[in-house]
Image: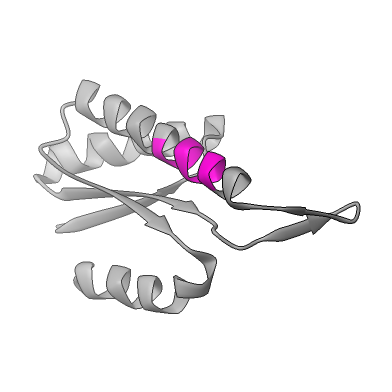
Amino acid sequence: MYETILVPVDGSDNAMKAVEEAAALAKSFDSTLQIVSVASDQRYVQYGVTLGQDVMESFRERADEILDDAKEIAEKKKAPKLKPTLLSGFQKFKSQRNYLKSTVPR
């Protein structure tokens, strides 16, 4: 019934619960479970201070940790086909969105 199930994760409890539910569905239907975490690489100015590359790297590292946590949950639920994806770069959002659209059958 479902060839691919796409679950975006942000580290919240609700996102991780969604991974559990999606993994159960993926197991039931032998579906691919694509888990997506996004890290921004856009520079920020906060309180007059520009947050630089070191902050952007910490965002990427955190997004990667979130993805690993979600993957672990899905593996415990025995989701058969996992496709964890870390997307990085706010400026590249449009191409990433198109990539995701191309990986999910309609």
In this orientation, which residue lies closer to the viewer: 102 or 2? 102
Q: Quadrant of the N terminus?
A: bottom left
Residue 66 falls in image quadrant: top left
In this orientation, which residue lies closer to the viewer: 22 or 37? 37
Residue 1 relative to residue 42: left or right: left
Residue 29 relative to residue 33: left or right: left
Residue lying at 52% horizontally and 73% vertically, measured from the top left: 91
Q: Is residue 87 magenta?
A: no
Residue sitting at the far right: 47
**Residue 10 percent location from the top left of the image:** 52, 43
Residue sitting at the far top: 76
**Residue 26 percent location from the top left of the image:** 19, 43
**Residue 59 percent location from the top left of the image:** 55, 44
Residue 27 relative to residue 16: left or right: left
Residue lying at 37% horizontally and 28% vertically, measured from the top left: 69
Q: Quadrant of the C terminus?
A: bottom left
**Residue 54 percent location from the top left of the image:** 59, 44
Q: Which residues are magenta?
A: 57-64
Indicate how the structure is coloured in the image: one colour
Residue 76 relative to residue 40: left or right: left
Q: Is residue 10 above or below residue 41?
A: above
Residue lying at 28% horizontally and 25% vertically, measured from the top left: 72
Q: Is residue 3 above or below residue 99?
A: above
Residue 78 seen in render: yes
Give the dominant element type of the magenta stretch: helix, strand or loop.
helix
The number of discs equals 0
Residue 20 seen in render: no
